[in-house]
Amino acid sequence: MITVAIIGNPNVGKTELFNRLTGMKQHVGNWPGVTVEKKTGTFTYRGEEIRVVDLPGTYSLTAQAADELIARNYIVDEKPDVVVDIVDGTNLERNLYLTLLLLELEANVVIALNRWDMVKERGIVIEVDKLSELLGVPVVPTVAPTGEGAEVLKEVVMKAAKEKEVRRKIVMGYGEDVERPIGVVEDAVRKDASLSGRYPPRWLAIKVLERDGQVLKLVEESPHRAEIMAAVK
Amino acid sequence: MGELLRDDAELILAERRYQAIADILESTLTKGEGKWTYTDMFDHVFLHKALGIPIFLAMLWAVFQFTFSLSEPFMVMIGMIFGWLGGLAEELIANPHLASFVAGGIFDGLGSVLVFVPPIFMLFLALSLLEDSGYMARAAFVMDRIMYKLGLHGRSFIPMMIGFGCNIPAIMATRSIDNEKDRMITILVNPLISCGARLPVYVLIAGAVFGAKYAGTVIFSMYLLGMVLAIVMALVFRKTLFKGKPSPFVLELPAYVVPTAKTTILHMWERGKWFLVRAGTIIFGTVIVIWFLSVHPWAATAGGEMIGNSYIASLGHFLEPIVRPFGWDWMAAVALLFGFLAKEVVVGTYGILLGVEEGAVGASLVSLGLFTPLTGLAFMAFILIYVPCVATIGVVAKETNSYRWAAFVVVYLVALAFIVSGLIIGIGRLLGFS
């Protein structure tokens, strides 16, 4: 069975879109953190059953906040086939931050460009194809309350799930001064086969540089810890 | 890599990500020419620096005015039905014990609580409308501005808004606050937020002593008093028990939507049904105990006719000295004692003790001289402040993982209730009210 995780910033219409996809009935409130517990549902597309997991709404994926850690651990550990990142089209600057973090995690991302009606109402023009090309992921405009784009989204998600192995992977560069230490740590991390088998090495390297609590703990348990940490000392 | 060895590596990386986003958007995004959406227009008014808070307070006032005015005819209707059923039971049931149980216990006691189904549901209808339309998030936003200046965490306000419905889910909602100090403060002051269960007492007393015209405003003032006290106590706790600075808080404001009838009604029902559940369980049980104590010893009270000779009257007279300074009598003492279990019981207690038709409870509170506007106001304030219900205390114990904090909450709330009610009485008397 194909598993799809849904993620996005709080209040971008994530729960609504989740309901649209799965047809599950539940209350849609406005409080931040309405999705505290893990909600799952299923839908069938062209005879195939797809499981949908609703992740907590977050702005970031640090190890400091419980809800962010839940979302991040799910993506890292459960490796869903597709991660649908719901992005508020009227606020791309902030919303794409989470998208970049998901790409760093090497998640198989599909962007649902939500609030498409508001985007048009405000006279904002987004070149969807170009955005898709630059990020290296499919982008589907949606309007959660009316269900506009939901069918296209299902189709694109299916396609992304099937082409998981052959997808383009875009790596965002941090600039030379940052890339150098990333490269050093990454090389050290790769020497630990079990660690770099479980997590994307580049992501681990970035998190080591960021002094991410959870990743530092992982490194602590690695036989190569001295080497990895030496790279940032 | 010199620069990255410092702790701000995280900040530098975040900055670079935003730079990358800016680069991507440069070639893919053209912003609209400042076109105003309805959301922008509403926010311009609702989030206005000076007007935001007055608008929020006006909204709350309108909610209680709406709740009180619209539900009154329905309350009279339900009261009449229960009164009629009680009379019927007394006539038709031969066994005097059973007749007293059905008429006095069930219809007078439970009936006087169920009379408040209309205002409770109206309140939740109004709150659901505010929430589903997107306004509530704005209220949290405008309040956050002053709360943060006062040294309180912005996320604290959301549990406060939930507390208007019920303190139990509100205290559980504090789990979203990751700073332990911020969370503890929010839990400790949440019981001061006036929940739906306290509404029946306000409606009864305010309706009786202030009349229909001012009742809505008086009820609103109780909710306001609760919020002010919560903020004051939070400040006190911040300065004493939990020193430190609140962590900053981001709140996203959803676009306004016209709430659909289905969602709003469902939302109202979800929040309102606990009242019915409680009425059938804890309130029913407590009311039966009160009824039993009010008609026994059976011979001495002549089957509940002479309530002054009952066990409950003895208990009440024993406790009366504690509340006498506030101008309340033994019935109030009993009502407050049993009100520890659930606030609605206060109303049920008066229903039984006065033994009059449901619709007439308020009127006899005044005609018997049990409350004046001043003592009534002090009584409502006491009800507001002293311990919401046992279930809330249980949740405090569970969420703080400590019975000590639960005990602390009870002690500080009861003490605060005595202080505030005492101040109301004292100041009122100084101003010449009685």
Image (cartoon, rainbow, N blue to C red):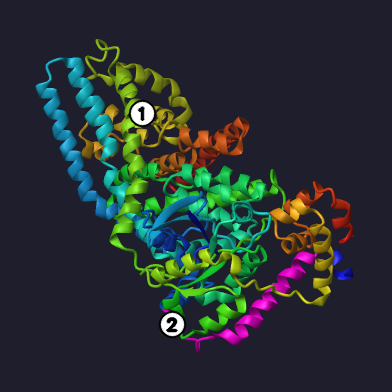
Bin the neighbour count of mark 2 within 10 Å (Cα to Cα): few under 14, some 14-19, many 20 and up. Answer: some
| Residue, disc 1 | B331
Secondary structure found at label 1: helix
Q: Chain of mark 1?
A: B
Q: Of residues A162 and B172, which is closer to you in this image?
A: A162
- The residues tagged by marks 2 and 1 sit, at their Cα atoms, a distance apart of 64 Å
From the viewer's perspective, is the residue at label 2 or at label 1 nearer? 2
The three-letter amino acid code for the residue at tag 2 is Lys
Q: Which residues are magenta?
A: B8-37
| Residue, disc 2 | A120
The three-letter amino acid code for the residue at tag 1 is Met
Specify whether disc 2 shares its chain with disc 1.
no
**Is residue B257 shown in magenta?**
no
**How far across and down, in percent of the image, does residue A190 sit?**
79, 59
Image quadrant holding the C terminus of chain A, namely bottom right
Residue at 26% of width from left, 12% of height from top? Answer: B298
- Please say whether residue B434 is visible from this viewpoint: no
Position of A188 relative to A141 (above/below) = above
Residue at 51% of width from left, 81% of height from top? Answer: A128
